[in-house]
């Protein structure tokens, strides 16, 4: 089974405008849609859509649990979130206008996880996860679930012997690297941050790959590097008409894990992940991609071994 | 009894930011609050707070009626909204940052009122309103409640013989003027629009007052004119530290009607309305004002008969 862990999820409210938003004015909303935010859940959506069973885990507040679960169900995400009493899952507002590719996000702070809920969640993982499973940890940490808790969680998963993928940043990404997880996806800035001795980029990626099975380094418009078995693949994604790039990274990670779980070769896996992400950016929301488009786009992914 | 009519109300979600909102960025929300929008309900809030009984009327969607009524109750607004099946009362988003006085509004379109609900609402008014009552009609018309329906509604109220106050704009304001209601509050632009022959402003206001008992012309920072019994009063509001001027006009109108219903003199009424509106702009939301501040501010309202 694949599990995704979203510790600080959100109910995303997408507010579509006809015109570009003007500050200090009244802007008319022409459409409203809902999505689940918080990265891990986007991974689950992608994995499910690619036909691979998975369960989304994490925390949710009980005050708006109905709404939260309603959106998860509408996105066909199988889930088993740990309920936090007396709190609401944060809502985030994403303002999108029809004419531009940029979105403006307004994000609430999110849950404060009480100590006993952290313990309950970690205990649940201990009994649930085994060595055949894959686990994706993605997104930010909520208040109350601190860096030592993340360390504890990754160690529990390592003990279970499962595949551990981490889409994290900053201190949490450093923690994932130190603990030798199986998959990381730093961007250029995070890579520079990790590369404390200022090594040559490719050499540094290879050194990360000594301990981490899959290293994907996203380079923005320049595509990405994928390092596996000490081989470096430069990946150029297909050219598409970009509407909204929010969620493209989450889609890439979800599809990558789906590919690995299906036993695809590294090149097939990269091709699938890159095509899914490319399809995603042609849609205005944060998660939608199209399976027919993916089949076409897969042939347009350029992969060169360096 | 005073009734306020809000035909297209809204659940206002106030999103407070620490910093100025930046487009195409992630902006952190530090606090969220709720209010009822749609003008008439703000009038009700003001009237209630000044100790005068009143009932807020209008339409609400049944899909989020719980939330809507919860906010009305939290604002201590007595209400009897007509339920529209299968629809949601619109939600509006008001982005406020701590440092500036401007707010950015994102507004949904609102209800579509079916024909039978329009008829039901007008029938309810016929049986409910009598000659001792005051009725405030404020805000925009929802889809399905068109200009001829407004005409029908005002004529029903005129037949009942009640006091009719209209805080309307554009075509609906013109309709109110044609039907000789008892109170209007055009702003400078609306006044220019109404004054088709380009008469001298004061002369034009006096001519409106021939048929309309109370005419208040708001002039923005320059204060306002109030015309009653052919006397023109120039009103200069107290100087205050402005945080948010949204809702100040609604507050003025509510307080004005409360003053009239209490039998205050025209000068006392103006003084109360102007002080309430001045207190309102010192608060960051769309309706709050402070009764203690009002008492102090009343002494600072400047009223000059022209």
Image (cartoon, coloured by chain):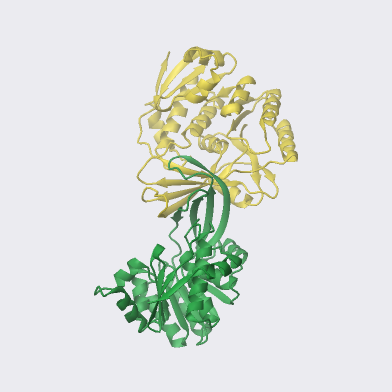
Chain colours: A yellow, B green
**Residue depicted at x 55% and y 81%:** B262
Q: Quadrant of the C terminus of chain A?
A: top left
Q: Is residue B223 left or right of residue A107?
A: left
Q: Is residue B288 above or below residue B30?
A: below
Of A306 and B241, the residue lying toward us? B241
| Residue A259, above or below A95 | above
Question: Which quadrant, please, contains the N terminus of chain A?
Answer: top right
Give the answer, above or below, for where A165 lies relative to B241. Answer: above
Task: Where is residue A140? Give x, y as percent.
Answer: 59, 35
Asked whether A171 or A156 is in front, the reply is A171
Q: Quadrant of residue A110?
A: top right
Is residue B27 among the parts visible in the rendering?
yes
Answer whether residue B120 is visible to the viewer in this image. no
Q: Nearer the viewer, residue B37 or A67?
A: B37
Q: Is residue A206 above or below residue B156?
A: above
A17 lies left or right of A166: left
What is the residue that sits farthest to the left in this orientation? B197
**Where residue A233 sits in the image (x, y, percent)?**
45, 17
The mark tally for this picture is: 0
Q: Position of residue A222 (x, y in %)?
A: 40, 24
Write the residue at 41% across / 39% down: A244
Residue A179 horizontal side relative to residue B18, left or right: right
Query: Residue B18: horizontal and vertical position, in percent?
Result: 54, 45
């Amino acid at each position: 089974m694949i599990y995704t862990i979203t510790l600080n999820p959100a109910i995303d409210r997408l507010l579509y405008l006809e015109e570009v938003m003007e500050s200090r004015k009244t802007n008319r909303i022409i459409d409203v849609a809902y999505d689940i935010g918080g990265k891990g859940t986007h991974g689950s959506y992608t994995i499910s859509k690619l036909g691979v069973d998975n369960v989304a885990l994490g925390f949710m507040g009980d005050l708006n649990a109905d709404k939260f679960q309603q959106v998860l169900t509408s996105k066909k995400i199988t889930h088993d979130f740990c309920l936090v009493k007396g709190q609401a899952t944060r809502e985030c507002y994403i303002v999108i206008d029809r004419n531009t590719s940029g979105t403006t996000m307004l994000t609430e702070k999110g849950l404060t996880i009480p100590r006993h809920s952290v313990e309950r969640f970690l205990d649940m993982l201990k009994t649930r996860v085994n060595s055949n499973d894959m686990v994706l940890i993605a997104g930010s940490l909520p208040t109350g679930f601190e860096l030592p808790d993340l360390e504890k969680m990754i160690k529990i998963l390592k003990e279970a012997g499962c595949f551990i993928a981490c889409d994290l940043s900053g201190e949490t990404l450093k923690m994932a690297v130190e603990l030798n997880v199986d998959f990381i996806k730093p961007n250029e800035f995070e890579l520079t941050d990790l590369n404390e001795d200022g090594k040559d980029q490719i050499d540094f990626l290879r050194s990360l790959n000594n301990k981490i099975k899959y290293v994907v380094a996203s380079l923005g418009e320049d595509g990405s590097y994928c390092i596996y078995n000490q081989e470096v693949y430069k990946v150029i994604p297909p050219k598409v008409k970009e509407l909204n790039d929010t969620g493209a990274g989450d889609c890439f990670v979800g599809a990558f894990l789906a590919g690995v779980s299906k036993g695809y070769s590294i090149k097939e896996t990269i091709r699938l992940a890159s095509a899914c992400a490319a399809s995603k950016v042609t849609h205005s929301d944060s998660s939608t991609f199209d399976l027919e488009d993916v089949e076409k786009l897969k042939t347009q992914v350029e992969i060169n071994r360096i």
